[in-house]
Amino acid sequence: MSATTASLHSRIDQLARIQSEVLGAGITREVYTPAYGEATALVSEWMREAGLETRLDAAGNLFGRWNGSEPQLPAIWTGSHFDTTLNAGAYDGVLGVLGAIDAVAQLRAASFVPRRTVEVIGFAGEEPRFGAGCIGSRAMVGTLQRSELDTMADRDGVTIAAAMDAVGLDPDRISEARLDPGAVAAFVELHIEQGAVLEQRGIAVGVVERIAAPHQLRLTLTGEARHAGSTPMALRLDALGGAAEVILTVERLARDSASGTTVGTVGTIEVEPGAVNVIPGAVTLDIDVRDVVLDAREQVVSAIHDAIDEISSRRGLSAELREMVFDRPAPCDPQIVATVRAVCEELGTPYLDMASGAYHDAMVLGAQVPIGMIFVPSRAGLSHHPDEYTEPAQLDLGVKVLAGTLARLAA
Ligand SMILES: [Zn+2]
């Protein structure tokens, strides 16, 4: 096979042209769509060009395997995802997959022979097409139940099971995607920071020490939709007024959190009936609370519960709260963290120890295998946005750090 490998940068551009729908200047490539299948085929081809043996598991996770000289040893895993959220950027997730393929190609070119098997993984459905994300990695650790495939649906009402079916995956076989924790020695994910800390500090590499995890709730407040003109203020049960109080309370409680690192966000809101001359009768909103410190996060969540009780009873609204996502913050493995630092030192690259505010497949796998993450800067901290950008030299440096890390872990 010819060793003509297109550069990482042109591959990122090529992948960016494969979209499941065009929603703006950014990229939309949702999991389990024909476009995602096309992307999977292209990434598989690149994996094979790098000498990796490819396979797809029952959840649609793509694996590229480089056999070690002692294949019975627990393997070194690396990778990320190449699905995107809506109208997103070209680097989120993609860097960790294509960068890992590039890292393998570099190690091969340097005649490196791994003792442990190295596997590059493209995790299916990290982005929340179906409400919650990390479908592929959750299937691997066994926290995605068969029943959820029928209950979780996308914005068009398509369930995970139906979407899997449409692309030739059998939802009844999802449990076959389970990983054997004893067979994985380490998982390392290269990713853009999705924040502006590295850029502000002028440091090109972040060594992640822990990953914050979300607790997400969906709140529906119900009041009475009455005529906005003929209903006196004293007789109103305005659901949106209550929601406004909840939103500001979430902000305040997160800001006052004991850890100082909790973040709280209301990112969606739906108002019914949504007419200028009708008092809002029902409002549904999503609350996202995250922290690297579980206790502090849960204190904020329970204070939010109390506040919702108080606000709804004072305003005569009924409140229905649904648990959507409960994840545990994941500490990175100290030995992997030390390895990444050592590689940076060897390369003479300044690095910053940091926490990841966003969740990643690494967080999910962290429940069962030792994990580490390497960050590169995101210009202006933008991510999930058409203007998401990382300088080519920063991408290359991230790949170099990943290659060095894989070499040490696999040796
Ligand atoms: Zn990502």
Image (tube, rainbow, N blue to C red):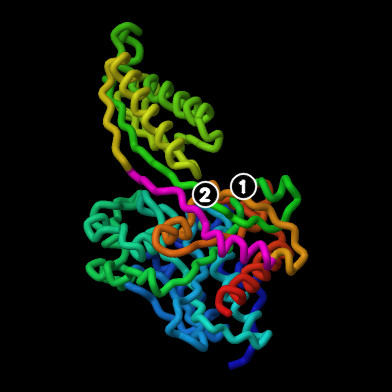
Residue 219: quadrant of the picture: top left
Q: Nearer the viewer, residue 229 or 90?
A: 90
Above or below: residue 325 compared with residue 351: above
Above or below: residue 81 compared with residue 260: below
Residue 318: quadrant of the picture: top left
Viewer can see residue 402: yes
Residue visible at 51% across and 51% down? 211
State the CA–CA distance, disc 1 to disc 2.
9 Å
Give SS at disc 2: loop
Q: How crowded is mark 1: few (under 14 residues within 10 Å), some or many (20 or more)?
A: some
Residue visible at 38% across and 72% down? 182
Where does the magenta region start and end?
324-343
Q: Along the horizontal axis of the image, is 72 left or right of 172? A: right
Q: Which of 343 and 24 is in front in this view?
A: 343
Above or below: residue 67 compared with residue 265: below
Instruction: Name the quarter where the C terminus is drawn.
Output: bottom right
Q: Which amino acid does label 2 sit on?
A: Ala
Instruction: Name the quarter where the N terminus is drawn.
Output: bottom right
Q: Find residue 2 and report its horizontal and vertical position in percent.
A: 62, 91
Which label was assigned to residue 358?
Answer: 2
Whether residue 51 is in magenta: the answer is: no
First along the sequence among labels 1 and 2: 1
Viewer can see residue 21: no
Residue visible at 65% across and 69% down? 399
Whether residue 337 is in magenta: the answer is: yes
Above or below: residue 74 compared with residue 191: below
Q: Does the residue labelled 2 lie within 8 Å of ligand 1?
A: yes
Q: Name the residue under label 1.
A: 195
Q: Find residue 83 and report its horizontal and vertical position in percent.
A: 47, 62
